[in-house]
Image: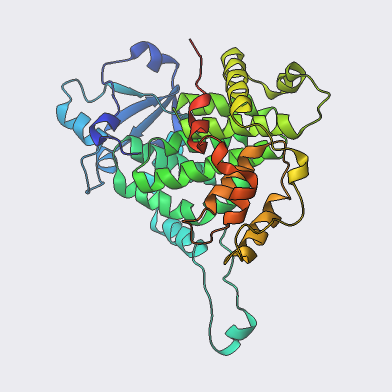
Amino acid sequence: MDVDEATLAPEIRSEPVPLLSQAAVPDSLYFFPTGDCTLLVGGVLFKLHKFALCRDAESESAFSHMFQDAEGSPTEIIPLDDSVEEFRHFCWALYALPDEIYRLGMGQKTQKTTGGFGRFFNKSTPLEKIDMRKFLGICNLAHKYLMPRFELWAWSVLQPHLSSYFPSCTLDDLEYLVDLGMRFRKAHSKFLLHNSEREWLGRLRSKNTACFGRALTLAEKHNRTSFQTDIYMEIRNQLLVGPSTISLDEFLTPMGLVEHQRECFIHGHAELSAMFQAPPPKLFVTTVPSYSSPCATHANCEKVWGRIICLDFRNVIPILEIARQHGRTSLAPAPCVGRFLDVDSYPHLDVVKTVFKSRKA
């Protein structure tokens, strides 16, 4: 997601906050007697050095702009709207000593030997575990305060660990990753959003029904319409292939949907049911007939049909998706499948993107 850098510059207030400072406590680590600026974060005072906050030479940070434009007393306390824990991690990045950076770098180094005894050790040494929330927080605040070199450094530490982090992180962590993905620079954003949303959908498919409403609310918050559609389609799939004795209300109750989400699903489900009626079960034979004499690609037709008959015919949309992926113009055509299912009698699948329109007031 491309965002104008100017819009990312946070608003940093520099007016005195005497009432707040009376109740504030100095941070145990990052309140330096030699510091020349005092920041208030969540009731904790951080006394830092302007040099540390302005040392990202690649760009003028939000702090450097603030210090250039400041007109008040140097002793004034500057309030910041950040998490204390995240800001403390950010301070660690600003003040980390050489041996800390060295140990971190060595812990993230993978080695793969190729000669001598290397033939007995053909796998890379595992990476040392890192505090993911710590480096995500550093990345977050470095991005917020326009410090790209710190952001890229934190991202380089995070990147090798993210693939294993997604399956193990909490729902709170997943929400946080989506929030970051909406704000980060384009390459990072695409990776975070794609993998976070894929992990959400994987958990929903594993029948974690209580997550549906939360996932939809997150998608609505960030206007992720494609993600919303995927969530609604998964709800619909579980409804179609689930027990036929359960009522719609009984099915939706554990999903945790709010009223406008329930209404959106019910309307969209009704529209799709009218447009995509399931084919009769008698069509689902083990072998697809050949419609040419002979069909030049019939081996692929049978292969594709083998995938289709493993699906539940009560939800025809995934079946049509496979059949249309292997149309006559594809690199692996299976024309007999499309003709047998009469795919041309169904609407184009793009209509799925339009039916789940939120009716939120």
Q: Is residue 222 visible?
A: yes
Q: Nearer the viewer, residue 148 or 302?
A: 302
Is 317 drawn above or below residue 247 in the view shown? below
Give me the residue at 62% from left, 64% from top: 298
Q: Which image quarter is the N terminus in?
A: top left
Res 223 → quadrant: top left
Q: How many marks?
A: 0
Q: Position of residue 144 (x, y in %)?
A: 34, 35
Q: Position of residue 231 (x, y in %)?
A: 59, 32
Q: Is residue 129 visible?
A: no
Give me the residue at 34% from left, 43% from top: 185
Q: Nearer the viewer, residue 343 or 247?
A: 343
Give me the residue at 30% from left, 46% from top: 148
Left or right side of 99 for 213: right
Left or right side of 285 for 136: left
Residue extending farthest to the right is 245
Left or right side of 53 for 264: right
Q: Position of residue 19 (x, y in %)?
A: 38, 11
Residue extending farthest to the bottom is 116
Res 81 → quadrant: top left
Q: Nearer the viewer, residue 101 or 242?
A: 242
Q: Position of residue 274 (x, y in %)?
A: 61, 25
Q: Nearer the viewer, residue 238 or 290?
A: 290
